[in-house]
Amino acid sequence: MTDSTTRSLAGKTLFITGASRGIGLAIALRAARDGANIVVAAKSVTENPKIPGTIYTAAAEIEAAGGQALAVPCDIRFEDQVEAAVHQAVSCFGGIDILINNASAIDLRSIGALEMKRFDLMQQINARGTYLGCKAALPHLRKSANPHILTLSPPIDLNPKWFSPNLAYTMSKYGMSLVTLGLARDLMSTGVAANSLWPETAIATAAVSNLLGGDELLRHSRKPEIVADAAHAILVRPAKSCSGNFFIDVQVLAEEGMTDFSTYAVDPRVDAALDFFLDEPITPGVMKTAFHIEK
């Protein structure tokens, strides 16, 4: 058992893609409470009534929480924008200690219904964007005392049920996981850790409320803070001995000594809904539901 409460990300620089809202912002705020520097790299520069939050509102929240923030407009599909964002991060904070590959696109339609432009978008943001972010940040991560790459992607399971009928989405998310798998081995001798993190349950984000199950699934979700707390626990661990893992949030927190996850529930009166890519719940009070990808 470890105790993350005595460890801190103070002074560390985190480069987080898609940190203007949701899980990315929750991870940023958790690190900000330690006094970390956060680079908010995302596309959202103006308010969208359906999906609130911009890189600038996120930066203000981070600074209010005790961190330093740099808001950088960045579409991770484009190499020049990613390289420019990394350059700004290094110029502002002197380096990069942690890369969080959080930005992701989702569309669960089958091959007959999904337009190729949507297929391309998911591959470009999810798989290619993760690869590109790692490529751009690695020269700077290698200079850090405890460098981590953490990717929000699921454990790899080649059971066909995870690919049907949402083939394109699964390809893109598993592409992110393959980056973790490959880099953990490639970087073994360098001391740069590469891990993935995935939630046990649905998480209360805009994707859940707008695209998946609406308000009803939102009630059966956990708050993004559970993923943020798990991420923090991973990122304060020694990189040299913590790499190549496909972590589930509750398992990480259990290793830290936590046994009660009810405080993370959006509505504690209902069971939480098991998230995609997991066969069975890990903790009590989690149910398989009709909101899931059809198996």
Image (cartoon, rainbow, N blue to C red):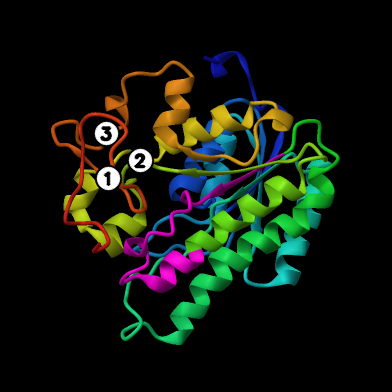
The reply, left or right, for residue 251 in relation to residue 175 is left
| Pair 2/3: label in front | 2
Q: Quadrant of the C terminus?
A: bottom left
Q: Which mark is residue 200?
A: 2
Crowd band around label 2 with a 10 angstrom C-alpha radius: few (<14), some (14–19), many (20+)? many
**How far across and down, in percent of the image, does residue 174 sit?**
50, 60
Give the residue at mark 1: 274
Give the residue at mark 3: 265
Give amino acid for label 1: Leu
Task: Provide the secondary structure element on which disc 1 rests.
Answer: loop
Q: Quadrant of residue 133?
A: bottom right
Crowd band around label 3 with a 10 angstrom C-alpha radius: few (<14), some (14–19), many (20+)? many
The reply, left or right, for residue 13 in relation to residue 209 is right
Give amino acid for label 3: Ala
**How far across and down, in percent of the image, does residue 66 sit?**
60, 29
What residue is rendered at 20% in x and 36% in y? Answer: 267
Task: Provide the secondary structure element on which disc 3 rests.
Answer: loop
CA gap, disc 2 and disc 3: 12 Å
The reply, left or right, for residue 204 in relation to residue 44 is left
| Pair 3/1: label in front | 1
